[in-house]
Amino acid sequence: MRELIKMVVVLTVLSAFSGGLLASLRNGTKDKIEYQQLKFVKGPAILKILEGATNNPIEDRFKLKDGEIDRSFFIGKFDGKTDIIAFESFGKGFGGDIGLMVGVNLNNDKIIGVGVTTHSETPGVGSRAKTEPGFVAQFDGLPLIETFKVKADGGQVDALSGATVTSRGVAAGLTDAGLIYKRLKPQLADKLKDFSKKAGNTK
Amino acid sequence: MAKSITQEFVKGLWEEIPPFRLVLGLCPTLAVTKTVENGIGMGVATTFVLVCSNILVSALRNIIPSKVRIAAFIIIIATFVTVVELLMQAYTYPLFLSLGIFIPLIVVNCIVLGRAEAFASKNGIAHSLADGLGIGVGFTLALASLGAVREVFGSGTFLGTPVFGPSFHPFSFMVEAPGAFVCLGLMLCIMNLVGKK
């Protein structure tokens, strides 16, 4: 009996101690890890869309609640004006979800750039959505509030040849981005106003 | 226990060098040694876990009841592996991405549990530290040398810098799984030949 109690006590204490240590370490590294993930996974797409921004969009980010999901938004500052924002949306592709980073100008609702962040499409076929700049460039300047469809489905998007499912996924992701944008636009505008005020004060 | 602390350290470098002499821990050895950098990263991560778990197991060896010792060792090892995982995510993210699943899999690396069970649970803290460090450094050296051979022939680079002229055609067999087996086999063979003399 004594031995049994000792076994239980030792294992419990050990597990509790280990749990406590890991929880505190996790809290301590959470922000750092999030930043690293943004920098290496989404960073390239964000920086390409917001090329020429005078701030660091990855540091100047904020979160908004969209229903139950927390979404991150990245602010791009151009010529002292902060009216451009980038955020991520997803569309179903051939091999899974395609992550899209969409940059939009809040003044005229127009897309300023689209980039693929994460995907598991067929290498050399669907993956061209990420590697061929021409494909995503066709969205530049289009208003984000409309529905996107590939031409074969009666829409306006030029599909990648041989990768219609991927192109549909990108179109669906953009449509979804438009919905998110419509839902959150008032809050986004508020946040941007706050941000430019803050930046103005520190200068 | 006649061995001195230095001897405990040195034995891990040649006499008991894990992948080549003990032929333990082959899963990460074969999987991550595509490049020298991956090999060193994996080796350092494993060394950290080995040293920390050896110290703790040795310190607690009289408290842990022998019936549940394996469970207790696994808790200790898993804790340190998670620590390594979080730290690598926070500070060396690209390396974390290229090692992927093999970081959490250090938990089931039989070298770590093997040293805890066979050595640290029977020896003092200083000796266990030396043992963990020796085995860890040996493991790192083995992974780095295997990684070096595979990277030089398989992609024509060493730590990312090209070593051959532009006319070199990479021997891509070496960076794939069969290349890992062949390469490990040849290195074992060389080790045995040298060891016999």
Image (tube, rainbow, N blue to C red):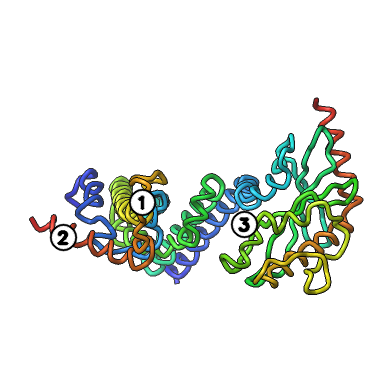
Mark nearer the viewer, 2 or 3: 3
Contact, mark 3 vs mark 1 (Cβ under 8 Å):
no
Describe the element under mark 1 as helix, strand or loop: loop
User: How far apart, in angstroms, are the residues tagged by discs 2 and 3?
Assistant: 48 Å
Which disc, if any, is residue B192? Answer: 2
User: Is the residue marked by circle 3 packed among few (<14), some (14-19), or many (20+) residues within 10 Å?
Assistant: few
Q: Is residue B34 visible?
A: yes
Question: Residue reaching furthest top?
Answer: A203
* Amino acid type for the residue under numbered disc 2: Asn
Residue A77 picture location, percent across and down: 78, 38
* Amino acid type for the residue under numbered disc 1: Gly
Q: Is residue B128 visible?
A: no
Describe the element under mark 3 as helix, strand or loop: helix
Residue A36 is left or right of residue A170, and the answer is: left
> Residue under mark 3: which chain is it in?
A
Instruction: State the residue at coordinates (50%, 59%).
Output: B100
Q: Mark 3 highlights which residue?
A: A131
* Amino acid type for the residue under numbered disc 3: Thr
Instruction: State the residue at coordinates (82%, 56%).
Output: A65
Q: Nearer the viewer, residue A200 or B71?
A: A200
Does mark 2 fall on the same chain as mark 1? yes
Residue A179 picture location, percent across and down: 85, 62
Residue A99 picture location, percent across and down: 69, 60
Does mark 3 fall on the same chain as mark 2? no
Q: Mark 1 highlights which residue?
A: B156
> Residue under mark 1: which chain is it in?
B
Residue B6 in which image quadrant: top left
Question: Residue reaching furthest bottom?
Answer: A153
Residue A195 is left or right of residue A137, and the answer is: right
